[in-house]
Structure formats: structure tokens, C-alpha cells
């Protein structure tokens, strides 16, 4: 719990995946991918319950084996490429409300971020408490600064490729840029319903994560990269 407020972890895991089939339950270091997020959420001292949202019976079975609850299956219309995370969350909250179960906050943990650990989860929640904000979203530094990135004309001329003010600067002298890493979305449940967004206006803060914890596995290359970082940790 967060003080006297209840916090629900939702792990979204549909069966369909075009680039890496079955990615949510693919083997990662000897156990299903989704189990890493389930176990991290269960280990958090702030999270009251962990629910997996899926339309797939096999994913549901695996999730239950690792300690998550799957009290209902996700509607088929919310298991398509077009379905968005907010609609999935609201569907979960609506189903729980029918059972007279309510949560003040939700934390969305995508199963494709297996290296996001319980420490990251707890720190993001503590950031929300410190900032007294309505939402927290995880980010990480980009590998390639966008100030050194541009399109090319048909003749491949480099004229105006980089702004002159950044042309002779070293990379460490450039402003830091961050990207969403997809690992953690933490939000006040009521504000999420009202605004239909995980980014609550004027009350959303960034939780900065290491790149090594931020890998979002969507391809075989991502899977190999995550495994290499895990091997490094273990050694």
C-alpha cells in the first residue's frame, strides 16, 4: 500500500506478436518472460495485488503458476494491435468494480521489460510520494543524441545537417535527451479514468532508469541484448 491507498499492478500480455511470436512467454534465462515482471511486482512492498490482463488461456495458466491473479480474461476487442493500454487498464478496473474491488493507484508493467526489477518499481513509487504527483512514467537516456540526427536531401548534401551551435561540441557537452522505455507507468486511477491517459496533465514526472534495465524486448536482437546484460550481472 501507499500510505492508506491501495496499489494494483497490471501486467498486459496478449498472445499476438508479429516480430517475436509468443514473446510474452518466450524463454528468458530459463523461465517465461512474463514471470520476471510478476515476481518483481510481487516482491514490492507497495503493491497490494498483481493481475495479468490477457485473452490467452496459456498465458493465464503460466501467470497463475508464478503467483499472479487472472480473475477474468481480456475481451477479444482489447487484444488487437489497435487496442491501447488505457482501455485495457479501464477494462480491468471496471471488472474489479463489479466485484466491489477498488484501487487508488495502478502500475502498468509490460512483460517485455524483464530487467526492470523490484528496486526500479519501488523507487518509481517513492518518486510519486516525494513529488506528490498523479503519475510517473519511466524513461532512459537515448543512445544517439537527436541533435546529431537529421534527414538527407536527394543529393545527400550535408549542408545544414547539424545546427552550427552543436557542430563542434563533443557528445558530453550536448543536452541530455530521454525516451520512454515502456517499463513503468504509475498513475492515480481516478485521474486516469477522467483524462483517459497515463500522462496526467501538469502532474506527471519522469522516473530515470539505467539503459541496462530499460531493454524492451520486441525482436530477437532485443532478446540477445537482454541476455547479454543478464549474463554480465550474473558473472
Image (spheres, rainbow, N blue to C red):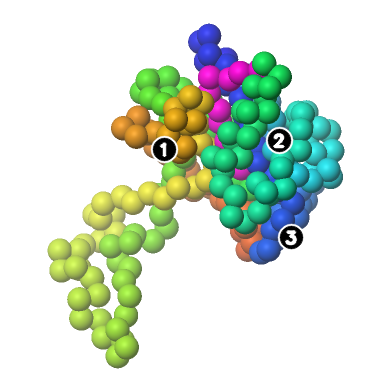
Q: Which residues are magenta?
A: 101-111
The residue tagged 3 is 21
Q: Nearer the viewer, residue 193 or 25?
A: 193
Task: Answer few, some or many: residues within 10 Å of disc 2's Cα (few below 14, many 20 plus, some between 14 and 19).
Answer: many
Q: Residues within 10 Å of mark 1 (few under 14, many from 20)?
A: some
In the picture, the disc for residue 199 is 1
Closer to the chain start, of discs 2 and 1, is 2
* Circles 2, 3 touching at the beta carbon (< 8 Å): no
| Label 3 secondary element | loop
Image point (75%, 44%), residue name: 55
Q: Earlier in the sequence, mark 3 or mark 1?
A: 3
Instruction: Give the answer, above or below, for where 70 lies relative to 99.
Output: below
Between the C-alphas of marks 3 and 1, the distance is 29 Å
Magenta span: helix, strand or loop, mainly?
Answer: loop
- What distance separates the C-alpha of mark 2 from that of mark 3? 19 Å
Kindly report the distance in space between the C-alpha atoms of the residues bearing marks 2 and 1: 22 Å
Residue neighbourhood size for the residue with mark 3, other residues' Cα within 10 Å, grouped as few (<14), some (14–19), many (≥20): some
Locate residue 49, reporting x and y percent: 67, 22
Q: Tag on residue 52?
A: 2
- The answer to whether residue 201 shows anywhere in this view is yes
Amino acid at each position: 500500500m501507499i500510505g492508506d491507498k491501495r496499489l494494483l499492478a497490471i501486467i498486459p500480455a496478449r498472445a499476438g506478436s508479429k516480430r517475436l511470436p509468443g514473446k510474452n512467454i518466450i524463454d528468458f534465462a530459463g523461465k517465461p518472460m512474463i514471470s520476471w515482471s510478476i515476481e518483481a511486482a510481487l516482491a514490492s512492498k507497495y503493491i497490494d495485488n498483481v493481475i495479468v490482463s490477457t485473452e490467452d488461456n496459456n498465458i493465464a495458466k503460466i501467470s497463475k503458476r508464478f503467483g499472479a491473479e487472472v480473475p477474468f480474461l481480456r475481451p477479444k476487442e482489447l487484444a488487437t494491435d489497435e487496442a491501447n493500454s488505457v482501455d485495457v487498464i479501464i477494462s480491468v478496473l471496471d471488472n474489479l468494480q463489479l466485484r466491489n474491488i477498488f484501487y487508488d493507484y495502478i502500475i502498468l508493467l509490460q512483460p517485455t521489460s524483464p530487467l526492470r526489477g523490484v528496486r526500479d518499481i519501488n523507487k518509481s513509487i517513492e518518486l510519486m510520494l516525494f513529488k506528490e504527483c498523479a503519475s510517473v512514467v519511466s524513461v532512459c537516456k537515448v543512445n544517439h543524441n537527436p541533435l546529431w540526427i537529421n534527414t538527407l536531401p536527394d543529393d545527400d548534401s550535408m549542408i545544414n545537417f547539424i545546427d552550427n551551435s552543436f557542430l563542434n561540441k563533443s557528445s558530453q557537452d550536448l543536452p541530455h535527451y530521454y525516451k520512454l522505455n515502456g517499463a513503468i507507468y504509475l498513475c492515480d486511477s481516478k485521474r486516469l479514468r477522467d483524462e483517459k491517459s497515463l500522462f496526467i496533465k501538469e502532474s506527471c514526472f519522469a522516473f530515470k532508469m539505467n539503459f541496462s534495465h530499460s531493454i524492451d524486448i520486441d525482436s530477437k536482437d532485443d532478446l540477445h541484448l537482454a541476455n547479454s546484460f543478464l549474463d554480465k550481472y550474473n558473472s
